[in-house]
Every structure is written in structure tokens, then in C-alpha cells.
Image: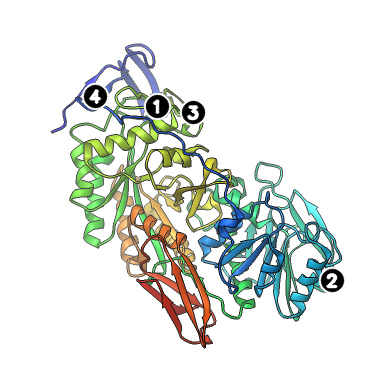
Amino acid sequence: MTRGRLVALIGVGVGLLVVGVAAGGLWLKEANAFYRFDGVTGPPGRSAIASAAPARIADFDHGGPHRLAVLVTDPASDWLGLARGFKAEGIPFTLTQDPQRALQHKVMLVYPMISGRLAPDILQGIAAHVRAGGTVLGFDLEGGGVEPVFGIKGEVPSQGRETLRWPASNGPPEEQTTRIGRAGGEGAIGSLAYQVTDAKVLAQYEDGGAAIVCRAEGGTACLMGADLGELARRAIDGRDEGAAREYVNQYEPSLDVLVRWVKDLYVAGEPMPWLLDTAPTGHDVSIVLTHDIDYTRSVVNSRAYAELERSAGVKATYFMQTKYIRDYNDDVFLTKQTVPMVRALQDDEGMEVASHTVAHSRVFKSFPLGDGREHYPDYRPFVETATTAHGGTVFGETRVSKFLLERLAGIHVTSFRPGHLSYPFQLPEALQATGYQWSSSVTADSCLTHLPHRTTISRAGSALSPIYEFPVTIEDEEKPRLGDRFEAESAVIAKIAAHHGLVVILIHPDIRDHKFAFEQQLIQRWKDRAWMPDLDEFGRWWRARDEADLDVVQAGGGWSLDVNAPEALQNLTVMLPKSSQGQLRLNGVTGHSIVPFK
């Protein structure tokens, strides 16, 4: 039995007795109370940031001719944003700097510019490729005499455009208008409007300029005026929040719509296209229920939610704050009395228990990284007010919280969520250094996508991190009350399910009442259509899918699907949009499904 006691926290804060004003009224700091678990100290050693080299184009330069080819004309561009966006959507692609290799593919994307980086003979080859029935997608022509191939006569740049509108779209309103940035702020993004001669305009900016155009002559030549690589990089690294219509609880598919348009272009132009589904076989959507235990009463209430989930045959992830200091936020609630309750969530109910920091501070995103030696009981962050805290570090919040949960509750922690979704730029490398695998630290709306993604070091978009991010879609703190907006949130899920996306739901178990009723309704309505695992289980499935290298190749008189997968693949669906090509033979994959594309 773990023993513990409440002791004075010396040298932190002010005075022996301080009265302040908090959301619920008066709060007391009686000697800044600190809860000590006798005989517990750690973790030992030091956590260190691993060196990470920038991603290389060569890392993605492989695969057969039936993939989408991305010809990178500027290695310093945001091509990695394209790669992460295409991987999430399940588009098979290859990156190359060799124009002749790209021209061997029926569908090729030239990024970020065409004429300014390619020799005249290559430009002529691109024109000939289109006339011969191929498909080419470009962004910036930069002159060079190929304008007639794309049906334009010039480009008009701007930093002030915010949206693309799709006149022919019959999807929901959120898919008819795509947000690309917010002018005049940090979210501003450059764009090009095309001066059309005989191209067809598929999307327009709010100022009426042509944003996406295509011209058909033999094959198809298209231009997209928004830099998709830059948009993807900024959005999925959580650096484009100003572009979103709403912060959370809504359907925001702006990045998804643009990537799906490229997917459709690939499918239309490639004789033997194939795609990876974004949901496991037999499911329309993945729903991950999560609970943030960051309030005294939440520890006890969590058991009721876990019993509901276990009885329904679904799982959930419980993000536990390891709060051992009484401060502005709340009283201590990681004690010898609550540790068995946390352990029971895993051992008795079969749920995942994850870290929700030590201090749960709104200003976690501004914490220094720390030296990687932070350990209990010496690590003592203190929250003074809603916007001030001291003594905390990113390493301390990740490293110490994980240690306490594993040491005291006997669980293995792989997932992390910061309090208030306060997201430090160095969090991906800190999570890697402290042994995590999964993060849920940002909202899906602010990322403009309802798919997970692999993070990058310092969220800078150049060096890949092994940490995967699973953004929050629906949460319980905005008004109206969660229980009063069930139909509205179910409608959001339905829109995401139409494209087999991911829905992460955050419910604080501070009360039962309408929140508990919401979850009951949710499970009842969606259980038959949705896969509802915990975050760790979904993360392992997604990572196996993301790291797998599948290729459709011609073999004699038929086709084969060759698979190189570092992790076992289960319940992965390969979609064949043009399945009349005949039987597909499988090499090296188990737990699969091959279906015609709907």
C-alpha cells in the first residue's frame, strides 16, 4: 500500500495563509499544501531531446508508376506538408526531383512552381504529357510559355484572400467554402488568382478571382492558386488557428476538401488508382471517447463513465492530472486514496489511463523546456492565477506526471493531453524524450482537418517526430450545455463519417447529469457504425497504416498489391476506384479488405 501525507511546500508562493478570488469564490493556500508519497522519488536519470535531421525528399522517392508523382522543384518548399496530407488521406504518392521519373506517371503534381525551375525541354515534356492524355497539377507557373497548356495568360498574387468557393459543390456548406487563411493576421497566406483564357474555373476566391482552374486537351492540366503544402504544414502543425471558422465543436474540413480534390484528380487520371481507407474495415468513422480528470470530484465520477463504456463494449481514454499541490486551480487530488481509483479504471474497467500534466496551467505553452532532470518530489510547479504560474517546465509536466501514474498506479502511459489544450512548440520532442507515443493537444477545427497526423519537431514542418497527434473534435465546455446539443454534435459526426474521419470527444467527468446522458445517446446512436477504441489502440492502428508502404504493380496478366509494413496491419481497407481491372493478388498483408471505391 502506498503511503502519503500532506506537507508544507516551502519556498514557493507567498505566506502561510493567503486568501484569493477564484471562479468558485474564495480559495486558501495553507502553507501551499503539498502531498508527499513516502518513499516515492523519480523518475531517475535525464530526458534528452533526440537529434532530428530534416526530412528528405529521398525518403519518399520510391514506388511504382501508378502512384501520384510529386515533382519537387524547390527542396526548400513545404513539400513535407503535401506528404503528410496525402498520407493521412490515403493517397499513394512518390516524391522526386527527377522530371523524367515524374513523367513516367500518368498523374503528376509539380510543386511549388513550374516554369521558374524547369528547363525548356522539361516544360515541353509536360505539355506533351498533357496532350498525350496525362494529368498535371501545378501551383505557380512563373511564365515560361506554358500558360496556353493550362488555359491562362497570367497570375495575380495577393496576401489578402481568405476563402475558396466551389460553385458546383453539392456537399454541406462547410465543403462549399474552403478557408485558407485570415488576412491581416498571423494566418495570412499568399495566393494566386489566374487570368483565364479557355480554362474552366472550378473554385473562386471571395474577390471573384479564379482559384482552381483546369483545361482539358488530350489529358488535363490544372492549377491551384493556394499553396497546398504551406497550408497543410501550418494547419496540421497547429500554426493556422486564425483560418478556422470556429475553434471546436464544428465541422471544419478546409484542408481535407483540398486534399480530397487532389485525390479525385488522381483517381480520374490514373488508369489503375488505389487508395487506403481512413477508417478500419467495416466502420464509417472512428470515435475516441476521452475524459479529462482535472477536478477533485472527477476522480470518483470517472468510475460511472467507465462502467457505462465497459457495459456498452467500447473503450475510452482517461487523462489524469497528477495534482499533488494545492493552488489556484484546485485542491490536491492525487493521493493514496485516489490512486486505487485510477488503477481500477485500467484493471477493472479496461480503460486507458493517460497523462494530463501535473499543474494543468493555461500558460503551459509558455513554460520553458527544462533540463530533463525534473523529478518528484522536487518538481513543484505552482499555478498562481488563470494566467500565471511558476516553477513549471515542459519536461516536468510530461516526465513527472508519467512517472507518478506508472509508479503509483502500475499502468503504462503512452498518451498525453495538456490542460486547456495549451500547446508548447517543443511538445513533440519533449513527448518523444519522455516515452510517449500519442498526443491530443489541439482541436480538429484549428487544424482544418478531421484526420490525425504525424507531428514535426517544434511544430516547424521540416523534421518528422514519431509522435502522432489526434485532435479534439467535440468538447463539453462551450455553451449550450453538451447534453443540449446532442443532435448538433451528432450532425457534425455524420459529416465526418461521410469521409471516414476521426472524432475525438472530450468530456470532463466533473458531473454526470447532461454529460453522462450525452455519452449514453452517443454510444447508442453510433456504436453500430463507429469503431470506438481508446486512444492508444487507435494510435497503434493509425501508425501501422501510416508507416505501411503499399504498391499496386502489374504482374503478368493481372495486378498485385505488394506490402512492406513495419507493424502488423489489421482491418485495413484498400479501395479500388476502377475495380474492373480484374482480380488483385495480395503479397505480404493480413487483416485486409479490398473493396471498390464508393
Q: Residues within 10 Å of mark 1 (few under 14, many from 20)?
A: some
Instruction: Measure the C-alpha gap from mark 2 to mark 4.
Output: 74 Å
Circle 1 sits in a helix, a strand or a loop, which is it?
Answer: strand
| Residue lying farthest to the top in this orientation | 15
Image depth: mark 1 or mark 2 in front? 2
Instruction: Measure the C-alpha gap from mark 1 to mark 4.
Output: 25 Å
| Earlier-in-chain disc, 1 versus 2 | 1
Image depth: mark 2 or mark 4 in front? 2
Label disc, if present, on residue 22 of the rendered structure: 1
Report the amino acid beneath label 3. Answer: Pro
**Above or below, 333 relative to 558:** above
Camera-nearest residue between 241 and 555: 555
Instruction: Measure the C-alpha gap from mark 2 to mark 3.
Output: 54 Å
Report the amino acid beneath label 4. Answer: Arg
- For disc 2, the marked residue is 148
| Earlier-in-chain disc, 3 versus 1 | 1
| Earlier-in-chain disc, 2 versus 4 | 4
Label disc, if present, on residue 36 of the rendered structure: 4
Q: Residue at x 35, y 67 (%)?
A: 570
For the rendered model, the colour scheme is: rainbow
Q: Residues within 10 Å of mark 4 (few under 14, many from 20)?
A: many
Q: Residue at x 31, y 34 (%)?
A: 322
**Above or below, 344 relative to 542:** above
Image depth: mark 3 or mark 1 in front? 3
Report the amino acid beneath label 2. Answer: Pro
Report the amino acid beneath label 1. Answer: Ala
